Image: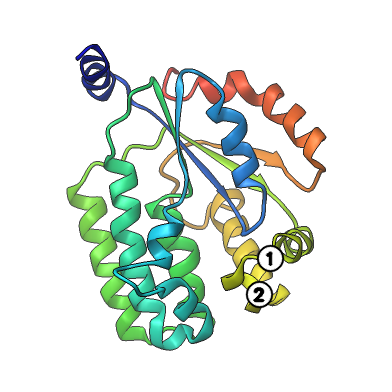
Amino acid sequence: HDALQHCLFSSLFSQNFISLKGNIASGKTTCLEYFRKTNNIEVLTEPISKWRNVRGHNPLALMYQNPERWGLTLQTYVQLTMLEQHQAPICAPFKMIERSLFSAKYIFVENLYRSGNMPEVDYVVLTEWFDWITTNIHIPIDLIVYLQTSPETCYERLRLRCREEEKVIPLEYLESIHQLYEDWLINRSIPLPAPVLVIPADHDLQKMLLQYEEHRDRILAAGCS
């Protein structure tokens, strides 16, 4: 009962939402695990397990195998599941989510379209959905933490971790994703939903943990200014 009251209190009065962004294999999982150990942060990872198994189907693998056919299918489901992440009640003063509804649209949908792997009609439909959601539903973000990593570093890390769906990802794909992140978060080509904290993330594990410690106070100041 006390736990339920705490969750309800936090959900009503805490508006401290941190969105962690970065390329594939930029180190987001390590960062999330670091902050998961902090008592006042609730961490939500990307719902990849849902994307791998929708009532027995794996739209994530299908999209990597044939993006033109399955891009709309996956990204429609990504929009739904990321909206669920944004709307999930929190039981702590801070919520840190991996990526966001915004990066799903501005990075991954945009990349599919620009690369010629998404027909314009699919892109337009997804954009209509995104515009309606962001106009009619409050999607709070107080801080974006951007793990800025070179595509080459991401490619090496991706090779080492050997996730089945990612075996078909070429370096060129990571370069495209990187450029979209740079355009959005560094060059501000699209309006930002929150301030951006850039953390250089090409370093080894020990140095990255030190950086998270160094930036801890600024991250925990999200929404308090």
Q: Earlier in the sequence, mark 1 or mark 2?
A: 1
Q: In this rendered view, identify the residue nearer to me: 35 or 137.
A: 35
**Residue 190 in sight from this viewpoint:** yes
Determine the image quadrant of residue 180: bottom right
Q: In this rendered view, identify the residue nearer to me: 61 or 88.
A: 61
Q: Amino acid at mark 1?
A: Cys
Q: Does residue 7 lie above or below 27 as drawn?
A: above
Quadrant in which the C terminus is drawn: top left
Residue located at (62% from left, 38% from top): 31
Question: Where does the image place residue 134, in percent across and percent down from the top left?
Answer: 26, 52
Left or right, 2 with reference to 118: left
* Mark 1 → mark 2, Cα distance in angstroms: 7 Å
* Secondary structure of residue under mark 2: helix
- Say whether marks 1 and 2 touch (CB < 8 Å): yes
Left or right, 221 with reference to 92: right
Label 2 belongs to which residue?
A: 167
Residue located at (17% from left, 50% from top): 136
Q: In this rendered view, identify the residue nearer to me: 198 or 187.
A: 198
Question: Where does the image place residue 49, in percent across and percent down from the top left?
Answer: 43, 58
User: Farthest residue toward the top?
Assistant: 2
Residue located at (35% from left, 53% from top): 82
Left or right, 92 with reference to 18: left
Q: How is the image coloured?
A: rainbow
* Secondary structure of residue under mark 1: loop
Left or right, 223 with reference to 134: right
Residue located at (79% from left, 63% from top): 156
- Mark 1 neighbour class, 10 Å CA radius: few under 14, some 14 to 19, many 20 or more: few
Determine the image quadrant of residue 48: bottom left
Image mark for residue 162 = 1
Question: Where does the image place residue 208, in percent across and percent down from the top left?
Answer: 75, 36
